[in-house]
Every structure is written in structure tokens, then in C-alpha cells.
Image (cartoon, helix red, strand yellow):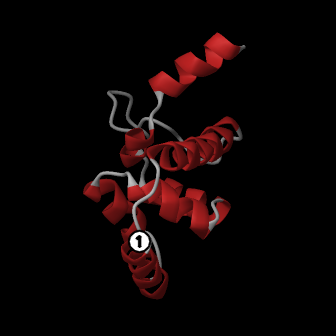
Amino acid sequence: PDLAQKIMDKMFVFDDVMKLDDKAIQMVLKEVASDALIVALKGAQPELKEKFLANMSSRAAETLREDLESRGPMRLSEVEAQQKEILKVVRRLADEGTIVIGGGGDDAMV
């Protein structure tokens, strides 16, 4: 089980959340606490931050931006731990059939 978890961690990393469609991102936002999201996004690529912000109300996005700017430097281990927690939520939602992971492949959705 430990090796399986390590393999899963390598197969789907936080940057892969970019592959989720907007509806899936909105579902993830409903499930994730804002504090966890702030910490996780501290170490995220700017494009991924913008993808999350674009799927929030303008007020919530502005609040998140302010919180990201006001929060000082954080330990990488803390950021990675929160990113893993968000990935667990993404996997759970995918297992439940609520969202689809890995869009952009050759298999078109109809």
C-alpha cells in the first residue's frame, strides 16, 4: 500500500490540476478549505493560481489574492502537504464520478 501511494503521488501531481475543466475546479473549490487552498497555491505555477481564481466569485478571488500576498514565506513541506490534501479531494471526487481527471486526451467527451 505504501508503494502504491508513492506511485499515485508521482502519477498525478498538483500541477496536473490544470488539466481539470472549470466545472471540476469549482467542485474542488467547494470541498477545500480556503486556508488549505492559500497554502497550496503559495507554491503553484501562476497559471494554476489564475485557473482557481477564475473559477471563484470576484469577491472570493480578490480575498484569496490578498491572503496570498499577505501570507509570508512558507515552508515547502507545508505547501506540499496541503497540495497532497487537495489531490486527495480531487481523487475522491473522481472516484465518486463527480469529476473527470485528465482531460485533453484523444478520448473525446460527448
Say how many tags the image has. Answer: 1
Q: Tell me if mark 1 has few (under 14), some (14-19) or many (20+) residues whose alpha carbon lies within 10 angstroms of its own.
A: some
- Classify residue 4 by image quadrant: top right
Residue lying at 27% horizontally and 58% vertically, measured from the top left: 46
| Horizontal relation, residue 40 to residue 106: left or right | right
Q: Nearer the viewer, residue 79 or 26?
A: 79
Residue type, numbered disc 1: Leu
Residue lying at 52% horizontally and 54% vertically, measured from the top left: 24
Q: Residue furthest bottom?
A: 59
> Element at badge 1?
helix
Image quadrant containing the C terminus: top left
Residue lying at 57% horizontally and 43% vertically, measured from the top left: 81
Image quadrant containing the N terminus: top right
Figure check: 95 above or below 38? above
| Horizontal relation, residue 43 to residue 24: left or right | left
- Classify residue 54 by image quadrant: bottom left
- Point out residue 70 in the picture as x, y percentages from the top left corner: 41, 78
- Point out residue 79 in the picture as x, y percentages from the top left corner: 49, 49
Figure check: 103 above or below 40? above
Figure check: 37 above or below 86? below
- Point out residue 33 in the picture as x, y percentages from the top left corner: 64, 65
Q: Nearer the viewer, residue 3 or 74?
A: 74
Figure check: 106 above or below 99? above
Q: Nearer the viewer, residue 108 or 53?
A: 53
Q: Residue furthest left?
A: 46
Residue lying at 33% horizontally and 37% vertically, measured from the top left: 104
* Residue at image mark 1: 68
